[in-house]
Amino acid sequence: MKLFLDTGNSDEIRTASAWGQIDGVTTNPSLIAKERTSFKELILEICHLVEGPVSVEALAPDFEGMMREAREYAGWASNVVIKLPLTIEGLKAARACKVAEIRTNITLCFSANQALLAARAGASFVSPFVGRVDDEGWDGMKLIEEIIQIYANYDFDTEILVASVRHPLHVTEAAKLGADVCTMPLKILKQLYHHPLTDVGIEKFMKDWEGQRQLVR
Ligand code: G3P
């Protein structure tokens, strides 16, 4: 499973890239709004920092506006992927982007039927928001299971990108189900590395080593 960082912060991307586990970045308007740099400069910097896909969201509500944004952002760097909302206009734009050879990530997906439509529109990625599904009292990971089954039935190429990840268990479940990608904030990526027994084990090894070295000296 590929791991993407869900952020608009270049320092976080630098940190995670140095750990060697980042295959791409997803941004969204809320994440970009937190940063103080100009939109274009920030996207160019992020695209330079990571080799993999960088999702950049189009904000226009209509097909023409989405296509204008898609053409512009896709021209900024070869790893830009255009994030489009799961609406009629968004899926129309996804189909046109496919023809124009612009990669897309269909965002704000909350049902298996929406994911079916995204794949039929030729999206490169679909982003089911598992955390927000859980927030509403449904089962976000059950949605991933359904999408995986549907995509396998028809051999769709669209990659399932698990988004709105809130805790490490979402990552484990996504990997167990065989999702293609999981995007997460830096805080959760960091949590994946940690286990209290690893820390206790290192401490004990160091103590034993130091004790033994004293005797030998
Ligand atoms: O990039 C989209 C996404 O991961 C949103 O997460 O936590 O705002 O639901 P969240």
Image (cartoon, rainbow, N blue to C red):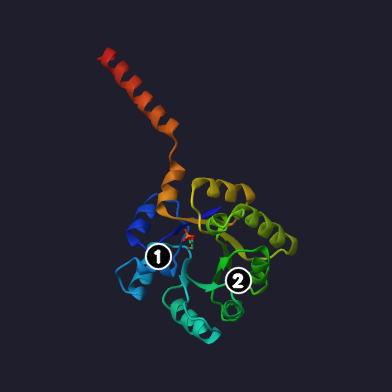
Position of residue 146 in the picture relative to residue 39 (left or right) = right
The residue at which mark 2 appears reads as 123
Q: What number is the disc on residue 31?
A: 1
List x then y, in percent, for residue 192.
46, 44
Position of residue 32 measured from the top left corner of the image (x, y, whole percent)? 38, 68
Residue 10 is left or right of residue 75, and the answer is left
**42, 166: nearer the viewer:** 166
**Residue at 35% in and 62% down:** 9
Q: For residue 162, what is the image quadrant?
A: bottom right
Q: Classify mark 1 as within 8 Å of ligand 1 or not, answering yes or no.
A: yes
SS at mark 2 in the image:
loop
Residue at 56% across, 81% down: 100
For residue 154, side relative to residue 55 (left or right) = right
Q: Are marks 2 and 1 in contact (CB under 8 Å)?
A: no
User: What residue appears at the point 44 percent right and 67 percent down from the top-left corner?
Assistant: 28
Percent coordinates x, y for residue 113 in the rendering: 68, 67
